[in-house]
Image: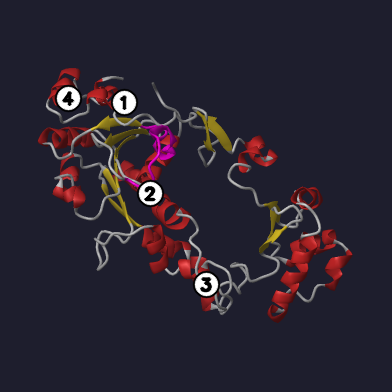
Amino acid sequence: MTRKGPLAGIRVVEFAGIGPAPMCGMLLSDMGAEVLRLDRLEQTDLGVPRPYHLDLANRGKRSLAVDLKHPEGIALARELIAKADVLVEGFRPGTMERLGLGPDECLALNPGLVYGRVTGFGQDGPLAKAAGHDMNYIALAGALHAIGREGAAPTPPLNLLGDYAGGTMFLAWGIACALLEAQRSGKGQVVDAAMVDGVAVLMTALYGLLGGGLHNGPRGTNTLDSGAPYYEAYECADGGYVSVAPIEHRFRDVLLARLGPEAEALPDLDDRSKWPQAKAQLAAIFRKRTRREWCELLEGSDACFAPVLDPLEAPSHPHNRARGTYGEIDGVVQGMPAPRFSRTPPDLPRGPEKPGASGGGLAVDWGIPPERLGTLVGAGAVGPGSKDR
């Protein structure tokens, strides 16, 4: 079946893993690329255990279960890589090289291949081969220190900042750039995405503030880290929360006007020494109404306001419903492909399939003869479920 989207016609071989690499494969698939995920014959500990249909980063992909410790499994992987436009892997440095599937070998097979690899610390450097997770990478990049409340320990922002912003997004961006360049040169190259590097780039604007002395207080005392009274989440009468962020004076004026006479007693919000007092007064104001009441008063205005929705509430918000920001695939609610395209919108993704379920059919589509696939299954190099479409 022909896929739609700006990456339609692009073939991707993804090596099964966790975190940023499979999410990158998902983004490429969301945009119409044909992603073939090479799964293990037997699933191992790859993070938080969950049923395959809830491993949503695998949506839209096909899966071929391959034993990469079997010579015939490696041979098949090489055949598929030779037919691909992109390779995605997220192993520790040196792993693909030990398998005989490193960049030198793969680019020799396929000179136009974009070889995308993502790690926490990068392919080289003193920490390159050390184990780690999102929190470690954002800690080393200086980001974790900056996130948290005054007087409290740093707060991990889920694994959004390191794994997915610093890792997935920079890998996907690098792959897109390399694909564009390959169209001109006919030559592929390696994309080395390190989460520490990506998070460092994401910190660029903050370094500008630091350089200008505009973000020089302890954690939780600056404008964007919960220090400012006008950039904060406040509790409401019903226990819900709302967010207000009118940094600019023209927006702040809208908020204060809508808060009513009580706001007139607030101290000068530009006086940092008065920030604790102003926050306490604003907290008292917001506790007088429910979240719904604050939404009725402030939502849609220039007060820079939004209710703090939990993940189960967010899909039902009228704005998200109107834009189709969330949708349901195989009964599971999730975010829909982004960004939007005016001329080449992608299809709705398929849900994740069971590892090895239909990759064999896709392998045949990639030019692997059925009889060869049958031989590989018999040799134990490919999972038995992979014979079927």
**Res. 204 mark:** none
Q: CA distance from mark 3 to mark 1?
A: 50 Å
The reply to whether the magenta stretch includes residue 52 is: yes
- Horizontal side of 363 relative to 195 (left or right) equals left
Q: What is the quadrant of residue 142 in the picture?
A: bottom left
Q: Which residues are magenta?
A: 46-61
Left or right of residue 340: residue 14 = left
Check contact, mark 1 vs mark 4: CB within 8 A.
Answer: no
| Label located before the other in sequence (3 or 4) | 3
The mark closer to the camera, 2 or 4, is 4
* Magenta stretch, overall SS: loop
Q: Which residue is mark 4?
A: 377
* Placement of the C terminus among the 4 image quadrants: top left
Q: State the separation of the CA atoms marked 2 and 4.
A: 30 Å
> Relative to residue 228, is residue 102 drawn left or right?
left
Q: Amino acid at mark 4?
A: Val
- Quadrant of image for the N terminus: top left
Q: Residue at x 30, y 49 (%)?
A: 90
Q: Which residue is mark 2?
A: 20
The disc label shown at residue 357, or none: 1
Q: Position of residue 97 (x, y in %)?
A: 16, 50
Three-letter amino acid code at disc 1?
Answer: Ala
Please state the horizontal and vertical placement of residue 388, each as a whole percent of the image.
Answer: 28, 19
What's the CA distance linking mark 3 and mark 4? Answer: 57 Å
Tell me residue 348's x, y (percent).
49, 29
CA separation in Å, label 2 and label 1: 23 Å
**Local SS, label 2:** helix
Mark 4 or mark 2, which is nearer the start of the sequence?
2
Alpha carbon distance from label 2 to label 3 = 28 Å
| Callout 3: SS | helix
